[in-house]
Image (cartoon, helix red, strand yellow):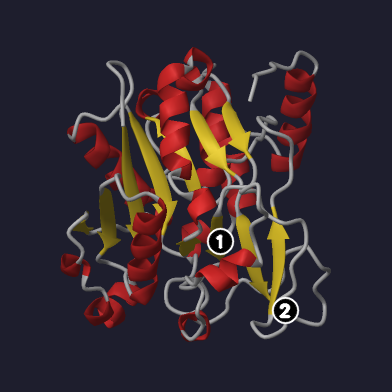
Amino acid sequence: MSDSRVSVGVAFASTGGFKIIRAVRSFHLQEPSLPVHVVIDASSNTWKSERFRTPLVDYSYVQSREVDNYSHINGTLNHAVRWMGELGYTHAALFHDDLIFSPLARNRNYLTSWINRLAASQDLRSASALSFGELEAFVKNPGTVRGQPGHWDAPPSMWDAMDLESPSFWESLIALDGTPLRTADFPVFFVDYCPAGEGLFDRRLRMGPTGQIVNIAAWEAVGGFDEAYGLHYDTDFPFACITHSLPPVLYIPGAPHLHLHNQSMGYADPALGLWGHFEDAFERKYHKVFHDFCVEVETERNANPVHIEG
């Protein structure tokens, strides 16, 4: 989908295994007209052990690349953006492999509709990225407060055993108007559930973990997602845009995809070494304490907010 100025390529970053099959299969049900590109981190432990469960060649709408990557998720996403640039796209819609997309008719072509709006709106085209707020699922534990993150390390086998692509499951998540329900309880699945609920186009300092449409020109201007300091892209990119005086990242709540947190992290490919201490990485790169910078920038930007019609 594009006009003469805007085109968006869809790319998933993956470490392999059944979860990427489920992600692209469910994405295709929601977005049947959009081709899918998958970048596989062939250096990951998951790929080395799970590649036999990743038959992407069985899906005609998927193209895939294997890359050697030693910069955690940032490196995989950088490969994805470069690939979309090589193909001539102006924007890259980036997703993780630990997602499931809504199969419901009322959510059909959700991303396509935003691509069309992007093409029609100068305000959206000038944004450094559009970040999609998501539905989130966490494993329950006794110390978890409802609606707040619990354990992020549910084993892939637990999620794989669940029928999470069925319309009956999603009827419990999505209201008749196509938006996420405010509450949902799944005792059978042993998860906590938390829909993103901020107002449309609230300014956010973070991109959100699993879905965003990135302006490739902005990505190029900041030198891509960080591969030197160990600062994950979802924290780094919005701040990099700020320090380069680029337009902000815009936040869109309630996207109809479900994020199963960290299906590989903690089991096969944890964030070790350089990638395990983001606050230290932030201070090394930006020479400020993360939380202080958040308060400073939020105060400055919210003093003169920009309003965009939804």
Q: Which residue is at 33% across, 44% downward? A: 10
Q: Nearer the viewer, residue 188 or 40?
A: 188
Label 2 Cα crowd, 10 Å radius (few <14 / some 14-19 / many 20+)? many
Relative image position of residue 120 (x, y in whole percent): 44, 18
How far apart in space, not on screen, are marks 2 and 1 (Cα)?
16 Å
Query: Circle 1 sits on which residue?
Result: 258
The amino acid sitting under disc 1 is Leu
Give SS at disc 1. strand
Query: Circle 2 sits on which residue?
Result: 140
Do we see residue 53 in this rendering?
A: yes
Give SS at disc 2. loop
The amino acid sitting under disc 2 is Lys
Q: How many marks?
A: 2
User: Quick one: quadrant of the N terminus?
Assistant: top left
User: Residue 213's quadrant in the figure?
Assistant: top left
Q: Which residue is at 29% across, 45% downward? A: 33
Q: From the image, state whether disc 2 or disc 1 is nearer to you.
A: 1
Label 1 Cα crowd, 10 Å radius (few <14 / some 14-19 / many 20+)? many
Q: Which residue is at 77% across, 62% downward? A: 183
Q: Nearer the viewer, residue 238 or 123?
A: 123
Above or below: residue 27 compared with residue 303 = below
In the picture, measured across the screen, residue 302 lies left or right of residue 253, that is right
User: Quick one: quadrant of the C terminus?
Assistant: top right
In the picture, measured across the screen, residue 158 lies left or right of residue 307, that is left
Earlier-in-chain disc, 2 versus 1 = 2
Above or below: residue 100 compared with residue 124 = below
Above or below: residue 54 compared with residue 190 = above
Relative image position of residue 142 (x, y in whole percent): 81, 82
Relative image position of residue 304 (x, y in whole percent): 76, 13
